[in-house]
Image (tube, grey):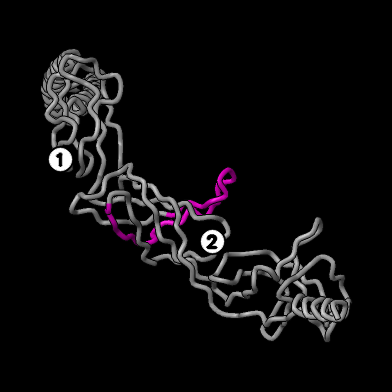
Amino acid sequence: MKRTLSLALLCALGLSAQETVPVVVQPLDRKLRLPAEILPYQAVDLHARVQGFVEKVEVDRGSVVRKGQLLIELSAPELKAQLAEVEAKAVAVESQRAEAEARLASQEAVLERLRQAAATAGAVAGIEVIQAQKAAEALRSQIASIQSQARATRASAAAIGELIGYLKVTAPFDGVITARHVHPGALANGPLLRIEQVNRLRVVVAVPESEVATMIAGASVPFAIAGGLTGSGVITRIARSVDPKTRTMPVELEVANASGKLSPGMYAEATWPARRAQPSILVPPTAVAVNTEKVFVIRSNQGRAEHVPVVKGAAAGELVEVFGALAAGDRVLRRASDEIRPGAALK
C-alpha cells in the first residue's frame, strides 16, 4: 500500500515539474528609480582679464545679480599712465600732420605759380617746376606716414581703453553669487567670484545602458528630493555616449526654478519611464535555467524539450522579461532544469 502511494506521489511530482505555461507577450511599462544630480543651468568662475588690485567688491555670497551689473572694481594705475602717454603721443602726431598739411598747401601754391609762369617761354626754368613738384610729392608722402602713425596711436589708445574697461567686472548673466574669493586690496590673480544661474536648472540622470533605447526626447520625468521636495523636468539633452566606467549615459532634464526651492548640488531620485519600443516576452522566473554554458528556457516543441537561449531583463510582477527566439503561442516549462536534455520527451 505504501509503495503504491509513493509511486503515485512521484508521478504527480514529475507531471507538475514538467508543466508548461504560455509565454506572455505584452507591452511592459516600468518605473525605474535612477539617481540624479541637480546642476545650475549656467555656472562660471569670474577672473580678472587684466592684472590689478581689488578696489571695491559690490556683492557677496548669496547676492542676486542681473546681467551687466557691476560686481568688482579693480585698480591698475599703470594702465591709466599708459593711456595718458598714448593720448599725448596722439596729440603730437596730429600736430605734425597739421604742420605738414600746411607746408603742402604752401608748396602746391608755389608749384601752381611756377606752372603758370612756365607757360611764357624763358620766364621760368623747367628744373624749377620739377623741383617744386617733387617737394610737393615728398610732403604728401610725409602726411600719409603721419596719418598711419595717427591710426596706430588711436588703435593703441582704444586697446588700452578696452583694458581699462576690464577693470570693472560685471555679471555675464542673471544669477546668484555662490562663492566669494577676494576682498579689497587683494591682487586679482585667481578666481574672484562664482556666479550660477539657478532660475533654470539641469537635472542630470544616469540612465543604464540597458534602458538607453527607452529614452524619448521631450518626455516629462518626475523626481523627488529628500525632505519632501518634488519636481519634474523635460528630457532635453541626451549625451549619446555611454560612460565606460559606470555603463550609464547622462541625460539632462531642463527644470524651471522660479520659486528657488531647488538648489544646485542637491541629490535627486528620478522616476524614469522605461517603455520598450516592442512588446516584451514574459515568463515565470522559475522557467529560466542557468548552467555553465548558457541561460535558457525549455520550450515544448511537439512534445519534445528544446533549449532556447535567452537574456534576462527586468522583473514585471510575478513574471520576468526575457530576450530570445520566443514568440506568442510558445509554451515553456514552468520549472526549467538542466537535467532535462534537448530532445527529451515531455510528459
Image height of 191 relative to 220, above or below: above
Specify the label residue 64 is tagged with.
1
Secondary structure at numbered mark 1: strand
- Report x, y in % for residue 109: 11, 26
Q: Magenta region: which residues?
A: 228-251
Residue sticking out furthest to the front: 1
Foreground pick, 341 / 32 = 341
Crowd class of label 2 (few under 14; some 14 to 19; many from 20; radius 10 Å)? some
Foreground pick, 70 / 132 = 70
Please identify the quadrant where the N terminus is shown. bottom right
Foreground pick, 311 / 217 = 311
Label 2 or label 1, whichever comes before in sequence order: 1
Residue at image position (50%, 70%) is: 275
Query: What's the residue type where badge 2 is placed?
Result: Glu
Q: CA distance from mark 2 to mark 1?
A: 39 Å
Residue at image position (75%, 70%) is: 336
Image height of 79 relative to 12, above or below: above
Q: Which residue is mark 2?
A: 211
